[in-house]
Amino acid sequence: MVKSIYDMIPVTWAIEFKDRDTAHAIYDSTMAKYDDNTFGSRTVNNDTWYIGTKLHDDEFKTKITEFLNQYDIASDQYTITKTAVGTFFNPF
């Protein structure tokens, strides 16, 4: 089966927390169990995590929510937003 270009280029998702300290504390506490092979590479900047993933939208949202739930981080403590970074666009 031939892969689509969308399956080969990662899409960047932003997970925003209430403040910088919260984002960095959760990032540090989840580092041991975070799997780059499952989710994609992750970085933290200010109050936001950025994850470049090849997972489909629904699959990513489900898996990252389940992952954060393992650490008792309720979904009202963060927002998940798909960014335009890493998105391929063909106008033709």
Image (cartoon, rainbow, N blue to C red):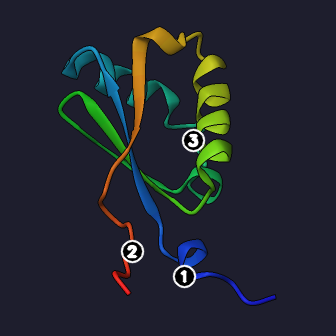
Helix, strand or loop at disc 2? Answer: loop
Left or right of 21: which side holds 78?
Answer: right
Left or right of 37: which side holds 18?
Answer: left
Circle 2 residue: 88
Q: Residue at x 38, y 87 (%)?
A: 92
- Report how far apart the C-alphas of labels 1 and 3 lie in the structure: 26 Å
Left or right of 19: which side holds 8?
Answer: right
x and y, in percent, of residue 48 in the image: 28, 33
| Residue 5, disc | 1
Q: Residue at x 30, y 27 (%)?
A: 24
Is 18 situated above or below 46? above
Check disc 3 and give the amino acid type.
Tyr
- Placement of the N terminus among the 4 image quadrants: bottom right
Is 88 situated above or below 49? below
x and y, in percent, of residue 86 in the image: 35, 66
Check disc 1 and give the amino acid type.
Ile
Q: Residue at x 66, y 19 (%)?
A: 70
